[in-house]
Image: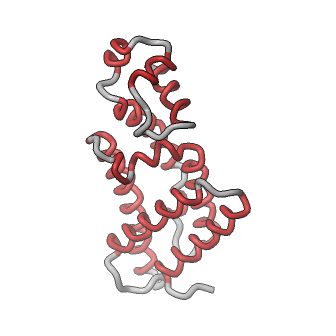
């Protein structure tokens, strides 16, 4: 099973999930097509296994959600960590959005990832509102969903640019998120 997952990871470094085939994965893993199907029902199931490996990496980026108030440095660090995961695994993460997202385990993973971030950010927004740091307004959960969508859309783009461009992009994203959450920030 590990050989199949490792082969898919390697192939996804140069191909999209749509270009990936069971035959190519099996060949790269050094197993027969029958052996592939013994472990995985589809190529998307292998991608789901790869996504499961990323679960803890994303969880490790969420320290900012436990902070209170405007913490630009912690948010920027969160964005840097998330960008690192996206840059290292763009071809796998790309299948959690768009037309490739048609396999129930991938949909479930994407929903769980979104829910984990949105729940954490909504809780932070409510804490910051209770402390008088963040303004009342848009429902906390709806605002958290907007931030998630903005962040992941930018991460998908930033995963493909050079280092100088990524630093400016992360700084801009951080500023945009702070303004969404807190209004004008100094």
Left or right, 85 with reference to 108:
right
Extreme left residue here? 104
Extreme right residue here? 164
Left or right, 45 with reference to 8:
left
* Residue nearest the observer in this picture, 92 or 85: 92
Residue 112, position as x, y percentages in the image = 34, 50
Q: Residue at x 59, y 44 (%)?
A: 88
Residue 2, position as x, y percentages in the image = 48, 21
* Residue nearest the observer in this picture, 156 or 19: 19
Q: How is the image coloured?
A: secondary structure
Left or right, 132 with reference to 105:
right
For the N terminus, the quadrant is top left
Confirm whether residue 78 shows in the render.
no
Residue 85, position as x, y percentages in the image = 56, 48
Q: Residue at x 59, y 49 (%)?
A: 87
* Residue nearest the observer in this picture, 35 or 71: 35
Residue 127 falls in which quadrant of the image? bottom left
* Residue nearest the observer in this picture, 38 or 128: 38
Confirm whether residue 154 shows in the render.
yes
Residue 170 falls in which quadrant of the image? bottom right
For the C terminus, the quadrant is bottom right
Q: Is residue 115 above or below residue 48?
A: below
Extreme front residue here? 19
Residue 118 falls in which quadrant of the image? bottom left
Q: Residue at x 58, y 76 (%)?
A: 175
Q: Is residue 21 above or below residue 168?
A: above
């Amino acid at each position: 099973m590990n050989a199949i997952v490792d082969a898919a990871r390697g192939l996804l470094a140069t191909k999209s999930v749509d270009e990936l085939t069971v035959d190519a994965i099996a060949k790269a893993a050094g197993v027969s097509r029958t052996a592939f199907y013994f472990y995985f029902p589809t190529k998307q199931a292998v991608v789901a296994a790869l996504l499961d490996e990323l679960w803890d990496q994303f969880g490790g980026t969420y320290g900012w959600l436990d902070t209170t108030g405007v913490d630009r440095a912690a948010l920027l660090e969160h964005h840097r960590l998330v960008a690192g995961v996206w840059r290292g695994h763009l071809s796998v993460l790309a299948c959690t959005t768009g037309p490739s997202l048609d396999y129930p385990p991938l949909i479930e993973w994407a929903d769980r990832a979104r829910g984990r971030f949105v729940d954490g950010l909504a809780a932070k927004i409510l804490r910051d509102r209770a402390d008088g740091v963040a303004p009342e307004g848009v429902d906390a959960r709806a605002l958290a969903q907007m931030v998630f969508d903005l962040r992941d859309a930018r991460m998908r783009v930033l995963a493909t640019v050079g280092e100088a461009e990524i630093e400016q992009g992360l700084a801009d994203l951080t500023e945009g998120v702070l303004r969404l959450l807190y209004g004008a920030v100094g």
